[in-house]
Amino acid sequence: MQQVILRNSVSFVLLILLSFGLAASSHREAPLIADDPLADNTDVYAFRSPDDPTTITILASYIPFELPQGGPNYYTFGENIRYEIHIDNDAAVAGDEITYRFTFERTNEDPATFFNIRFGENIKATYTLERSIDGGLSFQTIVQDGIVPPNNIGPRSIEGGGEDLPGLNTTYEQLMADAITTASTGEMVWAGPSDDPFFVDLGGVFDLGNSPRQGDDAESRDGLAQFNVHTLALKIPIATLLKAGAPATPVDILDPNYVIGVWASASRPATTTFESGDSTTFSGDWVQVSRLGMPLTNEVVIPIGMKDYWNAITPYDELTDTTLDGFFYNPELALYMDEDNFAIAVPAFNPLRVQTASQTILGNVDFSNGAPGLHILKGNAALAGTVLESGATYEPFLLPGNAKPRSVDLWPIFHTGVPNARPYQLATGKPAGNPLAAGKPFISNFLPNGGDMLRLNMAVPVTPRNSDDFNSLGLIQAAVLGLTDARYNGDLTLQNIPNMDGFPNGRRLEDDVTRIELQAVAGVVLAAIGLGYDDRTLPNDGLASDALLGVLGYTTEVEENDRPFTTSFPYVAMPWRGTEVDHTNID
């Protein structure tokens, strides 16, 4: 990204910020998909199941901003759409190893009424689930006529009923439970409406980055509270997801053979023809119209002119197509965390500051946009034994150029995952000022297969949700414990640090990904491996610097979902009821 010449012009900054949106993870994030909500992929989650650690749960949500009261034509999964969940478990093999494909049918069972539910469901949706384990060459049907629960319309429609009375005469909890099925190949499956599990202050964010909201009387609020989405849920045995030849039991909790990449997509036929009456025909090849792996990629990293392009390509296209790499090397968000650029225009981001003079024994390193970053060390003998060493396999990707400072942290987080190798180990045990030294092993979810997807090491144990150590900051909190907690910072041995199973090592429902990613843009990952902050006007206090403490203490003030998640599959919260919501007075 080019440096902006008018560095101190607040008016120019405000014009730039008009296009700045940190929206819900992927809700209406691109111009074309905003007009096609049924195919709009909003979020993807992948985590080791907390109540069954022999399995991995993958969730993919679609259809943003569903008003629970939005009848009579309530949202549901679309026909003539392929909803797919993709899994890659071997970077040496091109493309997906496993694909799950959902397709839906809708039947009008009671055409004589305008009610969605009367004595039964009116528009009833069912699904077929197919699975491919040969890279998409062939698909096997593993669920036929799967049940999709109706929308949670209201108490008369759901609980009402009985002899000669309208309503389904049940509870919504029972409808959700009845829709859980087991595929012929052993996976647990669920598809239906749910509370939107993402949480963020949309109103504040779109108001020129006002998150947390500034002012004595300002109140941050979850902009997705009381909205629903439609969610696909799979609970898959780890054995099913393992790459060919991987041991049945991991060598340790960072076994690289246990890393998978997960992403989701939606595709439509290339041609839609509207004919007289209500007849519509579809033809042509299937075309991908939406995709999602890491949250917020297309939202805050990719600029608006490239968002439709990003949705149309796959993560594997990014292996050779480097068109978008520059937006990770010099992220726009970092401009609003840099006092030499536009930090003055976004006071809410005051705690978030990018390192401009990270002091090391090799000299000061500047990670601000357009600066050299660690490229100043390219070819230096000090890099020997690290993945940045000249001639190392991934050195050209991690040190690609002189003005691409975030090629060593943001780019690999989104494109490859992180290896358990120097310098990507915790600063615990490293000599002061030497981030290149060996440190405490921390995480290994390295899968260098191309581009954007959630990468999860399935060998990392579950952090119990009821543990005092459980934290929605995921790997950031795990790093804090590994650096500061006496249980973990005493030596360099590999330990199961709580929250090592959290984002960006996969993504749990509870993970506060907005805060984590903003902290990552500010450089918290660099600090964790020993590239601390300088504090500008103060002596460098290393990892305990005021600047780093400010980044770690940053909050959007919206840190949890509006509804608690459940403790069993599919884990998402029950969808909001059309008769209970009030979007005019949300606390």
Image (cartoon, grey):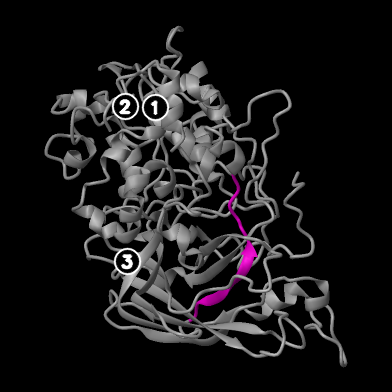
Alpha carbons under labels 1 and 3: distance apart: 43 Å
Q: Position of residue 138 (x, y in %)?
A: 30, 83
Tell me how far mark 2 sits from mark 3, CA to CA: 41 Å
Q: Nearer the viewer, mark 1 or mark 3?
A: 1
Badge 1 amino acid: Leu
Residue stretch rendered in magenta on the structure: 186-200
Secondary structure of the residue carrying tag 2 is loop
> Which residue appears at 31% of the width and 39% of the height?
327
**Percent coordinates x, y for residue 519 in the rendering:** 48, 33
Image quadrant where one finds the N terminus: top left
What's the residue type where badge 3 is placed? Ala
Tags 2 and 3 touching, CB below 8 Å: no
Q: How many marks overall?
A: 3
Q: Which mark is residue 246?
A: 3
Q: Nearer the viewer, residue 452 or 582?
A: 582
Residue hosting label 1: 335
Q: Are marks 1 and 2 in contact (CB under 8 Å)?
A: yes
- The answer to whether 61 is drawn above or below residue 156 in the figure is above
On screen, residue 329 versus residue 149, left or right, reads left
Relative to 521, residue 254 above or below: below
Packing grade of label 1 (10 A; few <14, some 14-19, many >=20) is many
Whether tag 1 and tag 3 are in contact, CB under 8 A, the answer is no
Residue 546, disc: none
Residue 114 visible in image: yes
